[in-house]
Amino acid sequence: MNSYLETGVFSVMGVLLILVVFIIIERTVAFGLLRKKLNTFRKREELTIELNSKLTTLFTIATSVVYLGLLGTVVGVILALGDIETSSKTEMMNGLSYALIATAASLLVAIPATVSYNYLAAMADKIVVEWDLKNDAQN
C-alpha cells in the first residue's frame, strides 16, 4: 500500500509542479507582451483581468498543495502504524519515510509556487502602475 501512496503522491505533485512551471513561463511571456501593447487597453480593469489571468490558479496550487502533502503524511503514518504488532522496525521506518516524502514533495511544489505567485502579482501591479502613468501623461 505504501508504494501506491508514494506513487500517487509523486504523480499528483509532479503534475502540479509541471502546471506551476507552465504558468510561470506563460505569465512571464504574457507580461512582456502586455507591456509592449499597454496602449491597446482602454480600461484599467481590462488590463487587470488580463494580468491576473492564471494567477488565481497559481495561488490555489501554492496554498492547497501543502494540505495534499499533509494528507499524504497522515495516511502514510496511519498505514505505517496500522500493523504495529506485526510489522518490523524496518517496515515501520519505511512507512514513516514514505509519509515524510509526501511532506517534502508538497513543499517542493508549494515553495516555488508561492514565491512565483508573489513575484508575478508584484509584476502585475507594476504594469498597472505603468499603464496609469501612461494614461495620466496622455490626458
Image: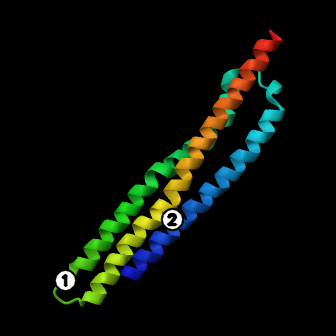
Q: Is residue 61 above or below residue 34?
A: below
Amino acid marked by disc 2:
Met
Residue 31 percent location from the top left of the image = 74, 40
Picture residue at 59% right of the left edge, 48% below the top: 116
Amino acid marked by disc 1:
Ile
Picture residue at 71% right of the left edge, 30% below the top: 127
Q: Secondary structure at mark 1?
A: loop
Q: Is residue 71 left or right of residue 55?
A: left
> Residue 5's quadrant in the figure?
bottom left
> Residue 130's quadrant in the figure?
top right
Q: Secondary structure at mark 2?
A: helix
Front residue (pair 133, 73): 133
Q: Is residue 47 above or below residue 132?
A: below
Residue 93 percent location from the top left of the image = 30, 82
* Residue on which the image places disc 1: 84
* Residue on which the image places disc 2: 13
Residue 91 percent location from the top left of the image = 30, 87
Picture residue at 52% right of the left edge, 45% below the top: 59
